[in-house]
Amino acid sequence: MINQTGINPERFIQDPYSFFAMARKQSPVLKTKFFQAEGWLITGFKEAEAALKDPRFIREEGNLPLEQLVVVPESVKPAIEINQSMMLFKDAPDHTRLRNLVNKAFTPRMIEKLRPTINELVDYLIVQMKGKIEHELIREFSYLLPVFVITEFIGVPKEDRELFRKWSDAFVKFIDFNTTMSDLEKIAGDIEEASNYFRSLIAKRRNEPKEDLISGLIAAEESSDQLSEMEMVATCLLLLIAGHETTVNLITNCFYLLLKNPKQYEMLTKDLSLIPSAIEETLRFESPVILTSRLAKEDFEFGGQQIKKADFIIVALGGANYDPEVTENPEQFDITRQNIKHLSFSSGPHFCLGAPLARLEGQIALEKLVTHLQNPILVEEPTLRGNIAFRGFESLKIQAEIK
Ligand code: HEM
């Protein structure tokens, strides 16, 4: 899979797991060139989990030697600034401050309160699918659910939902691993456009507060000066994008895997108590996010390797999920597995804030799909989208009658 010019992107996208297995065999912490990056690729579960929890692996470039940083064109700088203001790319103490501001809204108890709304939304989407046999599951169902939920939650008006599809695609490309500087120049404008949208929405909410996250953030900003407007924009954008790019793929990937494994599909329809483990096994087997990154804050030894200050660290969450030391027969999709272990929501301080929401949406969506879709079949093999770190299909065409 590795040729003179590096990794073949098409082959990697088709099967990243055998690439990770090959790397893990050489070393679970391996020095390598990975698309546009050069650094340490971590593919062992134990090592990946330890790295994500280790404060010597950081996200902010600020404290590192400048010669390591790439020269960035002026046109890309505003988009980079927005990205760098997101909690996902911050370290303590800023990370802790930003995360604490939204954490309260995302506790499992708060999310559980959304159950009736999510149930209603899913019922509505299923009703819309009635009377037809052919369906494109992403467009008709899996994309709409997380986007409806998160836009409602943040306070984005219904009529503006569609705007975010393009902006979200741009962001994913912006942080992917095979993105070049010329790609960045092409998409930086979309990210700026999205930030401007939020700036004007925040201005509207300042005059007319509502019961939504934006109004809550404004209150925090005004009462105790806890976050800047840039951070407020970045937080809204991050949540919106997380809602667009991940849960959509969790629902779709899960349904696809079940269609490819009809015995397990049947088992699930007969025993709905398997729903939570079907979702966890999907997260392990085909996670919507398979890679993340860190920077080394100092020189130190890790996983038997000598890491140098400012080294780039690629944590293969999808590689860890297939580590045979932790998961028996990892290439087997099995919804009856006990104690499923995965790092698909990461670990440590950046552990996915939206995990309880993603799990709840995934479980409700799957239960309603297997209950209402009669004898579903796959119309054609779906095409994977061309991202390296994010995994999902372009579309999923199925045939099914809706009960
Ligand atoms: C299946 C769905 C999802 C997956 C697989 C997923 C995955 C992840 C991962 C891997 C990270 C951490 C990356 C790192 O450590 O570098 C993360 C962080 C985050 N996720 Fe999710 N996510 C999902 C859904 C959501 C949803 C629905 C939301 C909110 C609406 C959300 C909000 C966030 C936020 C705010 C962070 C940053 C947390 C921090 O930096 O402290 N995610 N997610």
Image: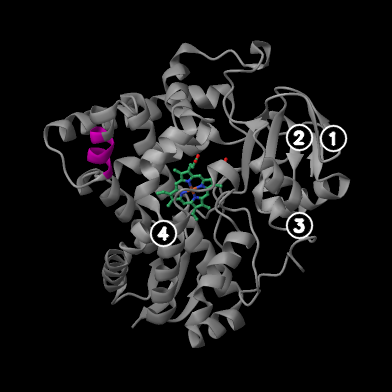
Of labels 4 and 2, the one closer to you = 4
Residue 158 on image: x %, y %: 22, 49
Residue name at image x 17 percent, y 31 percent:
206
Q: CA distance from mark 4 to mark 3?
A: 29 Å
**Which residue extends farthest left?**
208
Q: Which residue is mark 3?
A: 323
Q: Residue at 54% across / 42% down in the picture? A: 350
Kind of residue indicated by mark 4: Pro
Magenta-drawn stretch contains 217: yes
Q: Are marks 4 and 3 in contact (CB under 8 Å)?
A: no
Residue at image mark 4:
108
* Residue at disc 4, secondary structure: helix
* Dot 3 crowding, Cα within 10 Å, few <14, some 14–19, many 20+: many
Q: Is mark 3 within 8 Å of ligand 1?
A: no
Q: CA distance from mark 3 to mark 1?
A: 19 Å
**Where residue 314 appears, x then y in whole percent?**
68, 37
Q: Secondary structure at mark 3?
A: loop
Query: Is mark 2 in CB contact (under 8 Å) with mark 3?
Result: no
SS at circle 2: strand
Q: Residue furthest front?
A: 224
Q: In the image, is residue 304 above or below residue 272?
A: above
Q: Are marks 2 and 1 in contact (CB under 8 Å)?
A: yes
Kindly identify the residue that appears in the image at 39 percent across and 68 percent down: 135
| Residue for point 49% across, 56% down | 249
Check disc 2 and give the amino acid type. Trp
First to last magenta residue range: 213-219
Ligand 1 within 8 angstroms of badge 4 C-beta: no
Q: Horizontal placement of 188 versus 11: left or right?
A: left
Q: Which residue is mark 2?
A: 40
Residue type pointed to by label 3: Asp
Q: Secondary structure at mark 1?
A: strand
* Closer to the eye: label 2 or 1: 1
